[in-house]
Amino acid sequence: MYKLTHTYFVALICSILVFAGVLNTSSSQVEAHHNGFHINGTTLHDANGNPFVMRGINHGHAWFKQELETSMRGISQTGANTIRVVLSNGQRWQKDDRNMVASIISLAEQQQMIAVLEVHDATGSNNFSDLQAAVDYWIEMKDVLQGKEDVVIINIANEWYGAWDGGAWARGYQNAIRQLRNAGLSHTFMVDAAGYGQYPQSVVDYGQEVLNADPQRNTMFSVHMYEYAGGNANTVRRNIDSILSQNLALVIGEFGHWHYDGDVDEDTILSYSQQRNVGWLAWSWHGNSEGVEYLDLSNDFAGNRLTWWGDRIVNGPNGIRQTSKRSSVFQ
């Protein structure tokens, strides 16, 4: 048996420790990238472990499918780091199939934007069956979603649960999240507040219960700030602070400057979100109708002529040009 000297033995142990450290670091980096987006307290992190704050725009793809590529390029040219895409599971509009979803993800990647994908058909519904239909849709799309955890966030159902009732809203989403995880989807999930997204108290009261139903604890919450949730500066600050104080991750998933029943304080939404590192996604690119045409950000799908609202969001104080940073996965 070879007799080790003290000096050789110390050197050998140090080499082993250094090598183990390298292996551990490499393994952690691979695991972080493989896991994709993930939540830590109030912060969303990208696949490289860097904080990611959404600065983006909603696009009504379900109603304007033929304008997908044009809209993607136009929105990307604003500097937006995220695009929230309206999809349909076929209940109310023409269904977006696997090929379409794969195309949307690919185009968003090409334009270096994170894709927040949402099913719009359950909007305002209080029926658990409509939420279940959205869950079934995501499971059906699983084969094109898996492997894209670093560039896709799943917004389970747009504004499901129109009533201002947090208890039933929470039960619905607890069940939905368990099903999606059991099906093998490991993406970050986004859950809209009750009351058409305008009842943040539902998240304050029941958000922890919804998060605890997620075995990966990788769920964030979205408030839609229109006349009720974003009508004035005090309301905006209170709604943001109340959710962050619960150690929950928040994004303003939709907002405008005006809505059916009154004014929206868009300046405070932008400035206070910047102060608190909260993401936002302005509504919406082009094609609004039924009396809310004033929410168009652009006069065309290509983005050649921004509206007043679009210029405010893109070029104004605390807007996209000033605050948007692309995800590090594209670097």
Image: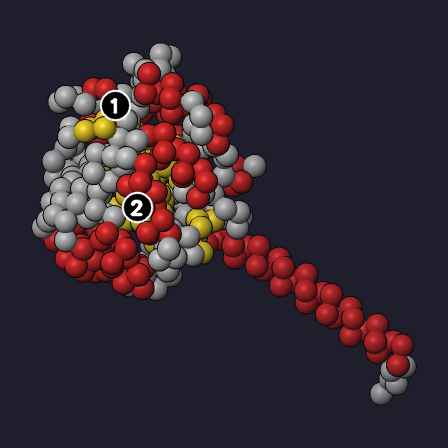
Q: Quadrant of residue 56?
A: top left
User: From the viewer's perspective, is 167 left or right of 26?
Assistant: left
For the residues bearing labels 2 and 1, Cβ distance under 8 angstroms: no
Spatial distance from mark 2 to mark 1, Cα to Cα? 22 Å
Q: Tell which of 154 and 42 is nearer to you.
A: 42
Whether residue 51 is situated above or below residue 108 in the rendered picture: below
User: From the viewer's perspective, is 49 left or right of 179?
Assistant: right
Q: Nearer the viewer, mark 2 or mark 1?
A: 2
Q: Quadrant of residue 65?
A: top left
Amino acid type indicated by mark 1: Leu
Residue depicted at 21% across the width and 34% down the height: 227
Classify the position of the N terminus by image quarter.
bottom right
Across and down, in percent, residue 150 comes to 45, 45
Residue depicted at 44% across the width and 37% down the height: 274
Classify the position of the C terminus by image quarter.
top right
Q: Tell which of 270 and 75 is nearer to you.
A: 270
Across and down, in percent, residue 91 comes to 12, 39
Structural crowding at the residue carrying mark 2, measured as other residues with C-alpha within 10 Å and reported as few (<14), some (14–19) or many (≥20): many
Along the polypeptide, which appears first: circle 2 or circle 1? 2
Across and down, in percent, residue 311 comes to 38, 18
Q: Tell which of 77 and 103 is nearer to you.
A: 77
Amino acid type indicated by mark 2: Asn
* Residue that carries the numbered disc 1 in the rendered image: 295
Q: Secondary structure at mark 1?
A: helix
Q: Which disc is residue 137 wearing?
A: none
Whether residue 57 is situated above or below residue 167 in the rendered picture: above
Across and down, in percent, residue 134 comes to 19, 47
Q: Which disc is residue 239 wearing?
A: 2
Residue depicted at 23% across the width and 52% down the height: 201
Residue depicted at 31% across the width and 64% down the height: 212
Whether residue 150 is situated above or below residue 287 in the rendered picture: below
One can see residue 111 in this view = no
